[in-house]
Image: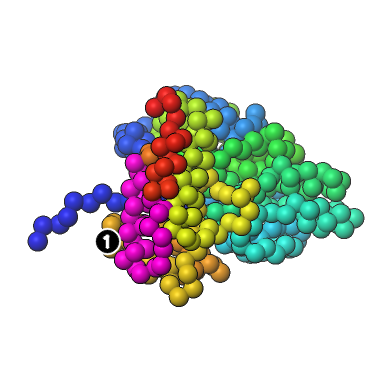
Amino acid sequence: MNAPIRNHFLQIPGPTNSPHAVLQASARPTIDHRGSEFAEETMGLLADLKRIFGTTQPVVVYPCSGTGAWEAALVNVLSPGDHILAYETGHFSSLWRELAERLGLVVDYVPGDWRSGVDAERIFERLSRDRTQKVKAVTVVHNETSTGVTSDIPAVRSAIDAAGHSALLLVDTISSLGSIPYEHEGWKVDVTIAASQKGLMVPPGLGFNAVSAKALEASQHARLPRAYWSWRAILAANEDGFFPYTPATNLLMALRTALNLLEGEGMAAVYARHARYAAATRAAVEGWGLEVVCRNPKEYSHTLTGVVTPEQFHADLVRQRILQSFDMSLGAGLGRHAGKIFRIGHVGAMTDLTLAGALCGIEMGLGLSSVPIKRAGVTAALNYLEATLPVDI
């Protein structure tokens, strides 16, 4: 038998689809990472990254995943035995906590329900009780990829300031940077963690730390072991457009092209596009008669939507049926949501037709899985997309 023509729908929350131009850039012949051409490219790239993060301060680039960028953020500003305050919003906040504990940090973990964002008032209460300023950092996930919930980072910053506390603010934007509005400097974040494979539309392999002046000062006194992750060595080499070790040269070429695409579209338009696709997806979920994971409409994510399946239906079996029938990948439920939800990614390189096709596949897959739904989801989403079609398309 002849193999069927494949047109895979990748609708997970990341890695996301990369535009053809980005993939083509990554396939360019590798250039000398000690040569003048590379240095010139790097200087321009680092300057443009600052605009994406919303900062005038340095952005450190690593050849790593988001997990590496988590570790880099911690080891550059903290010392063995330091206390940090972390807020539980889902699976990835839990993983970051575990990483911190393995590094020898003491974590005060504020419990959450995995369906809500950070309650800034609870941050204020914890820090107000810390009269000796034992807590050295607060860690928060901006957009929790396991749930589809976005937290209010300015409110967290305000809570820290209102408590009169000196703790650094470390924020994970791995599934929000380049797709949900974010201001590293304007929101007074000290370290912003990000990665290449979601809103930036680049294949996995680049991690980022955007760093405040306060964080740079803290790094001078931090005593956690660091060599590969050291900001100091990278920033020193970056002054001339280089890196202290072999960088991911072809991924940096891809990132150059991705930033050109984002800036060509305009970040306001990029953010509006993600918000529009998120709203259309939620319209579909409501039309099916199902429930989204996020409880508070003010915290709805613009990059993914978690969908709760009825108790008697295992979400992974629904995902498997959709994959087998329509060659489409959806995100699995993670941690305490395993088997109970599936996640629809609507981030990165997408169009109205891409989203419409994905929602059609989900509606058919739910029907084939005998999940009791109303057959109104796709219609609701299409009506929303038609009503909100930008006039300049």
Front residue of this view, candidates 120 and 177? 120
Viewport quadrant of the N terminus: bottom left
Q: Left or right: 217 with respect to 320?
A: right
The residue drawn where x is 65% and y is 64% is: 113
Q: Left or right: 45 with respect to 59?
A: left
Front residue of this view, candidates 253 and 165? 165
The residue drawn where x is 59% and y is 37% is: 181
- Indicate the position of residue 296 as horizontal and vertical percent values: 63, 53
Q: Disc 1 marks which amino acid?
A: Ser
Number of marks in the rendered image = 1
- Indicate the position of residue 326 as horizontal and vertical percent values: 28, 57
Q: Residues within 10 Å of mark 1 (few under 14, many from 20)?
A: few
Bounds of the magenta segment: 353-378
> Is residue 371 shown in magenta?
yes
- Indicate the position of residue 352 as horizontal and vertical percent values: 38, 39
| Residue 8 seen in the current view | yes
Q: Is residue 134 above or below residue 73?
A: below
Residue identifier under label 1: 325
The residue drawn where x is 70% and y is 33% is: 186
Front residue of this view, candidates 101 and 300? 300
Going by the picture, which residue comes out furthest to the bottom?
312
Q: Assign the magenta stretch its main secondary structure.
A: helix
Front residue of this view, candidates 220 and 352? 352
